[in-house]
Image (cartoon, grey):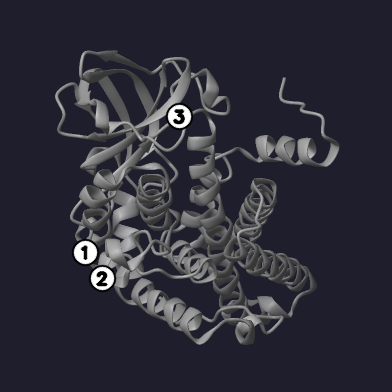
Amino acid sequence: MPAFHPLDFYNLEDQFTEEQRMVRDTVRAWVSDRFIPIVQEHYEEGTFPMELAPELAQLGVFGATLPRSYGCAALDNVAYGLICQELERGDSGLRSFVSVQGSLVMWPIHEYGSEAQKERWLPRLASGEAIGCFGLTEPDFGSNPGGMITTAKREGEEWVLDGRKMWITNGTVSQVAIIWAQCEGAVRGFVVPTDTPGFSAPEQGHKFSLRASITSELVLDGVRIPLDAQLPGVSGLKGPLSCLSQARYGIAWGATGAAMAVFDEALEYSKQRIVFDKPLAGFQLPQAKLADIATDITLAQLMNLRLGQLKDSGSVSHSQISMAKRNNVMKALEAARKVRDMLGANGISLEYQVGRHLCNLESVVTYEGTHDIHTLALGHELTGLPAYR
C-alpha cells in the first residue's frame, strides 16, 4: 500500500492542538503499519482481527473521552474524532469495533450506570479485557426503536429478559451487552454479561458490506439478571438515542477518513495511469471528479472540527450531529462511487481499497439512522413539524 497523503486543502492542521495532532498521527501510523496490510485478507474471509484488540487498548482508543480514573485516556472530542477518522481510513469495520466499545457500551455505563457498574466494567472495557455490544435494533424495529418488543419483567429479585436483537456489531465476541427493553411502561437499559444462561449471539453472515466486522443476532430467552443490572440513570428513549448521538459523532469523522482514503488512492492512481499517451489525471473529467471530491472532503473536515468544538463546549445538539452524519457519509459514498469509476476494472479488485470502502459505506449510510431518517430529523428541527408518520 503506498504511503497515505492526507488532504488538508484549507490548512486545518494549525487548528489542532499538539495533543490532537499527536493522537491522530499515532493512530494513523498504527492503521498504516498494523491494520491495512491485513484488512484485505480479513475482508475476503469475512473476519475481524481480534488479535489487534489489545493493541487498540494500548493506543487508548476505547472510551477515549472518559476519565483516567477508569483507565481511559480523557481526550477531548476533537482528538476522538481524529481517531475515528484514521480508523475508518483503514476500514469502516475497524471504526465500528472501537465506536461500539466506547460510544455505545462504555459511554452509557459511565453516563447512566451505578458506581458499581462503572467500577466493574469500565476498566475491563478500556483495557480490552472485555468487549461489549449494544442491543437496540430488532428484526422488525430499526428506524422506530420505540416499537421494540424485547421485554424485561421483574420476578422477585431478578429481571427476566426475552426478545431478539439484529445487526449487532461485536455481539458474538462480547463479554457484556447493553440491552434496551420495554420495562414497566418505559424503555430501560440493562448491563448483561453474555455468559448469562439464555443469552446467545449467533453470527450473521452472507454480507457484501462490513465484511471485516463481526455482525450478530442477539437472542434473549428467559435471561435472568439481578435488579442492579439495570442502568439507573435514564428512562425512556432518551437513553438509547443519546448513545446513538455519541456514535454518530464518530461516524461523521470516520466517513471523512474513508473519503480521504479513496481520494488519495484516486489521485495517485490517476497520475500514474497512462491513457491515450498521457496520465489519466491530465483529462478534464477526472480533474472535475477530483475537484468535487476534494471540496466535499474539505467541507466535511470543517464541519467536523466545528462539531467537535461544540461537543467539547457542551453545547452540541443531536440535530447538528445528524447533519454531519447525514452529509459526510453520503459525500463519502459518492466519492467512493466516483473513484471506483475512475479506476475502471481495477476498482473492483481488493488490491485497491476503493471497492471495500464503497461496499462498507453502503452500510454506514444506513446504520445508526438512515440517510432519510436524518433528513426527516433535520426537517423536524427546521420546521418544528414531524414528518415521520
Label located before the other in sequence (1 or 3): 1
Q: Give me the residue at 82% from left, 34% from top.
A: 384
The answer to which image quadrant residue 31 occupies is bottom left
Residue 280 % position (x, y): 67, 75
Picture quarter with the N terminus: bottom left
Which numbered tag is attached to residue 58? 2
Label located before the other in sequence (3 or 2): 2
User: For mark 3, what is the residue?
Assistant: 137
| Cα gap from disc 3 to disc 2, whole angstroms | 31 Å
Task: Say whether residue 22 is visible.
Answer: yes
**31 shown above or below 176:** below
SS for callout 2: helix
Picture quarter with the C terminus: top right
Which numbered tag is attached to residue 54? 1
Classed neighbour count for the residue bearing mark 2: other residues with Cα under 10 Å, few (<14), some (14–19), many (≥20)? few
Q: Give me the residue at 60% from left, 59% from top.
A: 314
**229 shown above or below 154:** below
Amino acid marked by disc 3: Thr
Classed neighbour count for the residue bearing mark 3: other residues with Cα under 10 Å, few (<14), some (14–19), many (≥20)? many
